Image (cartoon, grey):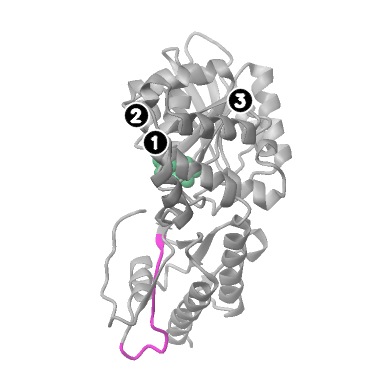
Amino acid sequence: MYEKINFETNGSDVQIIDLRSDTISKPTPEMREAMFNAEVGDDGYGEDPTVALLEQRAAELLGKEDAVFVASGTMANLISIMVHCSQRGCELLCGDNGHTFLLEQAGASQVAGVQQSILKNNPDGTFDLDELRKKIKKGDAFAPISTLIVIENTHNMCGGKVLPLDWVQKVGNIANEYNLKVHMDGARLMNAAVYLKVPPKRVCRDVDTVCFCLSKGLGAPVGSILAGDSEFIAKARRTKKLLGGGWRQAGILAAAGLVALDKMIDRLQIDHDHAYKIAKAIHATKSNIFKVDLAHLHTNILLMYVDHSKVEIRDLQRRLQTVLTTDSVKASVRCTSLNHNCVRFVLYWEIQKEDVDKAIEKITLVIREYDEMFRV
Ligand SMILES: *Cc1c(COP(=O)(O)O)cnc(C)c1O
């Protein structure tokens, strides 16, 4: 999915519009300034005031008792799994398109010794709740011990889909019924909150623990937040150290995180609008080869589906990136492929209105080119 493709552009007047991921976003000038001026201490001794402030602010924002600042979303998920599933023989239940299952090197099994039992993800990032009930083991001696349910919001592989609040509540109710915990992998939780027009704490109200990335659409250079009750976070702090995540003057990074919380959440709507604008332009081509699901586009991740009997994804990526001397549009557009039939465009703060317009020109030019090639 994240394999590196570097193709020639043509000439120095070419504008590169990198839509591979919102992780590409760089810290804002205000973040760099805050990092420069950050008050720091040894976080290993709990003495970094900027880290402490970030953790406190993040906990409030998420409506949880406490929070811990960690290196990455992957680390946050792994810590959460290790704390919740501390008994040997545990399993967690998650979607088959989920990040913990597909994109974290099976850390749950490899590091934590936890089995991931998968449920088929619906296109909207949810999974069937009857299937969930059926798959929860009820404690017989042959079965693993069902301990944790992991849900993802927004859902990355499903194209930035926001989980419906009532579905999350139902998951919480089922977890209570069977005495399981729920962890929300909310890497892009703030995008979900902005889409739903609710405070972030509402999005994760019905789950026990939650994490989100400061380093994606929020623009910070490094870091994620993991939140839950005080007892959970105390254990999470221990596990963070175990995984080598104990750090020292991390206030340098936390300072950028604080700017992210103050300045970068509300503006996510701009990224959503930009994604929608690109989607609308693709839709308007009425192409038979390239499709978007305009009606179900929620946030800053746009999937463009490709008729793979006609177009090789790699060729498409190459064409979007390349500027031919004969091209009227001097833009190189980068994207990732999720699988053989779709590419992913992701919006973030550095992609401004002019970049969006330029990207649209390039994408529609390439679409017309393919459509022309297959006209009968
Ligand atoms: C990016 C992402 C993660 C992992 O975050 P990193 O900081 O890249 O480790 C986890 N879950 C989801 C849904 C993500 O999109």
Residue 28 is situated, as x and y percent measured from the top left of the image, at 46, 56
Question: Mark 2 = which residue?
Answer: 247
Work out whether residue 349 or residue 145 is closer to the camera in this orientation and state it: 349
Which comes before the other along the chain, label 2 or label 1? 1
Which comes before the other along the chain, label 3 or label 2? 3
Frontmost of labels 3 and 2 is 2
Find out whether the residues at labels 3 and 1 contact each other: C-beta distance under 8 Å.
Answer: no
Q: Residue at x 48, y 15 (%)?
A: 143
Question: Mark 1 = which residue?
Answer: 71
Q: Is residue 335 visible?
A: yes
| Label 1 C-beta lies within 8 Å of the nearest ligand 1 atom | yes
Find out whether the residues at labels 2 and 1 contact each other: C-beta distance under 8 Å.
Answer: yes
Residue 256 is situated, as x and y percent measured from the top left of the image, at 46, 45
Helix, strand or loop for disc 3: loop
Question: Mark 3 = which residue?
Answer: 208
- The quarter of the image that holds ligand 1 is top left
Residue 2 is situated, as x and y percent measured from the top left of the image, at 34, 54
Give the CA separation, mark 2 to mark 1: 9 Å
Q: For the magenta stretch, what is the residue range? A: 325-336
Frontmost of labels 3 and 1 is 1
In the rendered view, does 355 fall on the left or right side of 103? right
Which amino acid type corresponds to the residue marked 2 in the rendered image? Answer: Trp
Work out whether residue 118 or residue 159 is closer to the camera in this orientation and state it: 159
